[in-house]
Amino acid sequence: MDCDLLITNGLLKTPNNPNPSPDQPGFVAVLGGRIIEIAPMTELPDEVRSARVIDAEGGLVMPGLVNCHNHAAMTLFRGLADDLPLMSWLQEHIFPAEAKFVDPEMVYWCVKLAAAEMIISGTTTVADGYFYEDEAAQAFKDAGIRAIAAQGVIDFPAPGVPDPADNINHAARFIEKWRDDNLITPAIFCHSPYTCSAETIRGAKELTRQEDCLFFIHVSETESEVAESLKRHGISPIRHLEQLGVLDKKTVLVHCVWLDDEDIRIVKETGAGVVSCPESNMKLAAGVAPQDSFIEASIPVGLGTDSCASNNNLDMFREMTVAAKLAKVHRLNPTLLPARQVVKMATSGGAAVLGLQGEIGELTVGSLADIVIIDLRKPHLNPMYEADSLLAYAASGSDVRASIIGGRLVMDDYRLKTIDLPEVVGKVNEMARQVRAGT
């Protein structure tokens, strides 16, 4: 057997074997960036020619995590304005800081820092949306992380797009540049119904339909947002988007905290996907998204960290455990969002939301080789009765020992292979000094 990469002696978490037995290690063979064989070690051919072999003994081999919502460049604003209501946080702190400090260099280096944090903690695919997204896409590509990079669209002067009238054209140029990349998938991110006019939302969605790419939008994040929509339009934000004709299988609705039964019915019938960001919603006191209702309605649901400015970390393991526990305490029902479901939301469920089902999110033959190895030698990961329980309730990003994206080893034995971390940290901290000084 010929392969580029061979992972041996690991416990393999596959769709057919989600809870691998500790006494049945297996191997994964990768060729051309995709998985070509998965089998027990007893079936490993006698002759294997591989460019690289990773011994995963003592590790759980699983699909990489999928972070369905992030504004990666906002690592610069981690901890800048904590403990504030959403609108005060945005209008009095974040928007002014972005106007003053966001430029191409800031986006490139701060996205690289976010990429490092995600790779180290087991995320292999991220959906990002921000300004100067061209620089973000380049940083993701240089870091070796898979990304759906969405150019930000908003109805006021924004970094990189000083004239709002040019926002759609700017997004079109971004999509054209990145449309054929093997690691970066371009998309559009409309900030929200309260910052984008009906004309802008329709225009952005029309462009994504022409280009066959995803359309992301924050919606119904706070109770006050819904109240404002009722005041302005006489209907909820979801109904407003439905009337605009922008809801379909290529629309990704982020947050969706304040949806009623009719909103949920509309989302289900249109085929739109939902991304829940429980840690961000908790920190900003936005509320608790009805994730159990989305799942019951068979709506595709993924998990996202949101940005470092509102979370303040990009660890998807933490997002999983918070999502599961928050759903239980919110409904006073310990059976809601069980471990297997929340792990699915962070892997294959997230892949489905992003239109990448079958490509990422599962350890299967034919899928892209986006793989992480969890170090089961850690004391808090023993004993293992059920892998999903361990991942949802005990593991953390610091337990990831190796990360592989598209068959490329981007972290091995806890060491990044594609990013000079001291350089990146130094660059971002120099920018942070300017933020502190207000210059």
Image: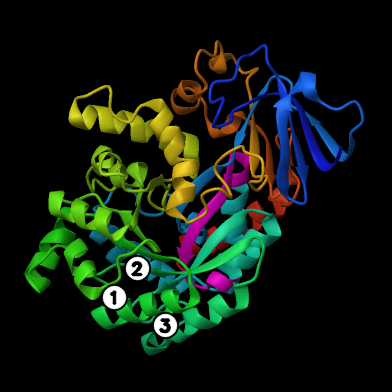
Q: Earlier in the sequence, mark 2 or mark 1?
A: 2
77 shown above or below 399: below
57 shown above or below 98: above
The residue tagged 3 is 167
Query: What colour scheme has been applied to the protein in the rendered image?
Result: rainbow
Q: Nearer the viewer, residue 362 or 42?
A: 42
- Image-based side of 10 in relation to 164, left or right: right
Tell whether label 3 touches label 1 (CB within 8 Å).
no
Residue 131 magenta: yes
Q: Indicate the amino acid at tag 3.
A: Asn
Q: Secondary structure at mark 1?
A: loop
Q: Residue at x 73, y 36 (%)?
A: 37
Q: Earlier in the sequence, mark 2 or mark 3?
A: 3
- Image-based side of 297 in relation to 343, left or right: left
Q: Residue at x 71, y 55 (%)?
A: 423
Q: Separation of disc 2 and disc 3 at Cα?
A: 12 Å
Q: Which mark is residue 191?
A: 2
Residue 26 point in image, percent of width and height: 72, 24
Q: Separation of disc 2 and disc 1 at Cα?
A: 7 Å
Tell whether label 1 touches label 2 (CB within 8 Å).
yes
The residue tagged 1 is 196
Question: Local crowd at mark 1 within 10 Å, few (<14), some, or many (≥20)?
Answer: some
Q: Earlier in the sequence, mark 1 or mark 3?
A: 3
Residue 308 visible in the current orientation: no
Magenta segment boundaries in residue numbering = 118-134
Residue 267 visible in the current orientation: yes
Q: Indicate the amino acid at tag 1.
A: Cys
